[in-house]
Image: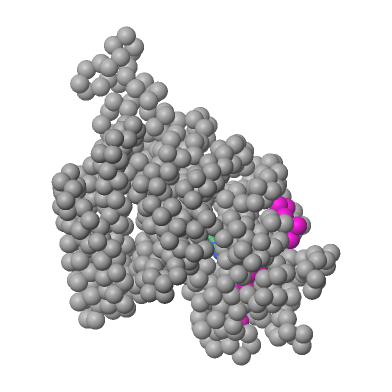
Amino acid sequence: MAAYKAPLRDIRFLLNNVFDAGELFASMPDTTEITDDLIAAIVEAAGKIAEGLLAPINSSGDAEACHFESGTVTTPKGFKEAYKAFADGGWPSLTGDVNYGGQGMPKMLSAVIEEMLFAANSSFALYTILNTGATLTLSQHGSDELKQRYLPQMYSGKYSGTMCLTEPHAGTDLGMIKTKAETQADGSYLLSGTKIFITAGEHDLTENIIHLVLAKLPDAPPGPRGISLFLVPKFLVDESGTLTAERNTVVCGSIEHKMGIKASATCVMNFDSAVGYLVGEENQGLSHMFTMMNYERLSMGLQGNGLADSSYQLAAAYAKERMQGRAATGALQPRLNADPIIVHPDVRRMLLTMRANILAGRALSLYAASQLDISRFHPIEASRKKAEQLVALLIPVQKAYCTDRGFEACVLGQQVLGGHGYVTEWGLEQNVRDARIAQIYEGANGVQALDLMGRKTVRSNGELLDILSGEMDEFVASQKDVEAMHPYLAAFEKCRGRLEEATSSVLASSSDDANAVGAASYSYMELMGLVLYCFMWQRILSAALADQKSGSNDTDYTDALVKTGEFFLQRLLPRTESLLVEITSGAESLMAMRAEQF
Ligand SMILES: Cc1cc2nc3c(=O)[nH]c(=O)nc-3n(C[C@H](O)[C@H](O)[C@H](O)COP(=O)(O)OP(=O)(O)OC[C@H]3O[C@@H](n4cnc5c(N)ncnc54)[C@H](O)[C@@H]3O)c2cc1C
């Protein structure tokens, strides 16, 4: 089996040539010290962790899985040592708040690192991602006292964090949660209820586990407006910040047996008058969670992309070695009985589909991450506001489209290996299983599509889309004198026209037909995904051509980029046409059958 290799060349090209990350960081006071050299050193070090520390315990972790016994969870062999090494390297504090022991690094940097962690070992990556999400929520909404007490330990890797939202009867519709919080005289709360599917709810990697829990106060208004956020530690921590031996009454009831990410503990968590502390304001729990959700959803897209890349690497290596059949143009290796399968157009279709979507998905993730960074660090308020609006539009597409394309890439990689992709030995089968969940958690992809079409497009009356269009116009204008870009730009304009037509059609029908938005939403998300991937390819192609023109000595690399981009434009982008037909066909055929007819 080919070992996972961190895609450092691609990352360098995207950060330096496509997004000019160094210049962006130099323009914002809190990130000026993050130079190209520092970025390169950190990315390279993270690549070594992914390749050397996490990839070697990926398939063994899958085979062994987590074990549950009497409320405790044991992670597979090697996970505890790897987590310690990860923490000792300072990785949990990378993007953290500098006032509490974090390093304050931008999301663009952590995005490429997360992708590598997910590619090498998705189960392991989840323990780290959940901790990052919990620290982010706490640092944005917690009181100074809570932050002092918990953040330094969560950044150091001594404690880890969870997000406890889901309940047996409340998944997408969190307004229905039943977990209750009762006020205590000392200002703390007692929480009671059951949460399910809680990633890293219990494990043996850290001294303490800090749960961020959604619950309802007794006098809370019904539905989503009556939800508050609480911090509930596994072991209580005293006022001086010292860990006590006193166990809080939150216990793991069981862990799930599931399709993939088997070394990630997915826990039922029972809260039985467990001591908790309010985070932020009463009844604002959902909106507090939403600040973190943009980051978490971005991470799920990165899981899809990471596993796609790991699958691509395995499949490309295999296709160059596996000898079956002859090239249609005549034997390539006449002294052998067959040619390598990479000579066959259909095998190339699969590999190029994977590669074209991985590069665009990584670029889209970086584009969204750059907007998160601008919204956090930029000194000008108008720039921060515009970036926030772009984030709101981009994230549901990045989450849903990258995870769908990620799963598809894992299946394509499996197909390239034929029967060898189906058996355990080569690792493709695990990637397929591990990638599937990213389409479901952090809001199922259908719900992301609804968010994009409903809240972000129809309800904003296309305002967010206009901001994105402005960015695209600016790019197109910057390329008008680059002749080699003209055919690429023509394809881009054509697909943008289709998106505009689709948007107008749904905006027009949404007032007459209550089902119009829901009926169009998934196809609309896919159309938007393709248009955004095309935008990313325009930027990659432009940077590749500029690099060639500058006399760079790595023309083989940029030549492959240009060829992959042309494949995307010719073979993948045309689907925008059929998506437009789907979107404009309305809701009738979807809603025609009565429920009993299914
Ligand atoms: C391995 C794993 C780890 C997880 N980790 C965590 C965690 O750490 N913390 C946590 O709180 N939760 C976690 N979850 C829960 C996860 O986020 C939910 O499963 C997910 O949000 C979907 O909720 P549900 O399963 O209840 O599905 P449902 O909400 O029942 O949805 C079922 C289907 O109906 C569709 N649907 C639902 N409502 C609508 C609507 N209004 N319009 C259109 N379609 C709709 C959905 O798209 C989906 O296809 C995890 C789940 C798993 C399996």
The answer to whether 103 is drawn above or below residue 312 in the figure is: below
- Predominant secondary structure, magenta span: strand
Asked if residue 167 shows in the view, the reply is: no
Q: Where are the magenta residues, as a range?
A: 204-216
Asked if residue 330 shows in the view, the reply is: yes
Where residue 576 appears, as percent x and y from the top left, is 22, 55
Residue at the farthest top position: 335
Residue at 29% across / 35% down in the picture?
Answer: 551
Q: Quadrant of the C terminus?
A: bottom left
445 horizontally vs 115: left or right = left
Is 205 part of what is drawn in magenta?
yes
Q: Which sits in the foreground, 375 or 360?
A: 375
Q: Which sits in the foreground, 13 or 209?
A: 13
Where residue 352 appears, as percent x and y from the top left, is 31, 38
The colour scheme is one colour
Residue at 70% across / 75% down in the picture?
Answer: 145
Where residue 438 appears, as percent x and y from the top left, is 47, 55
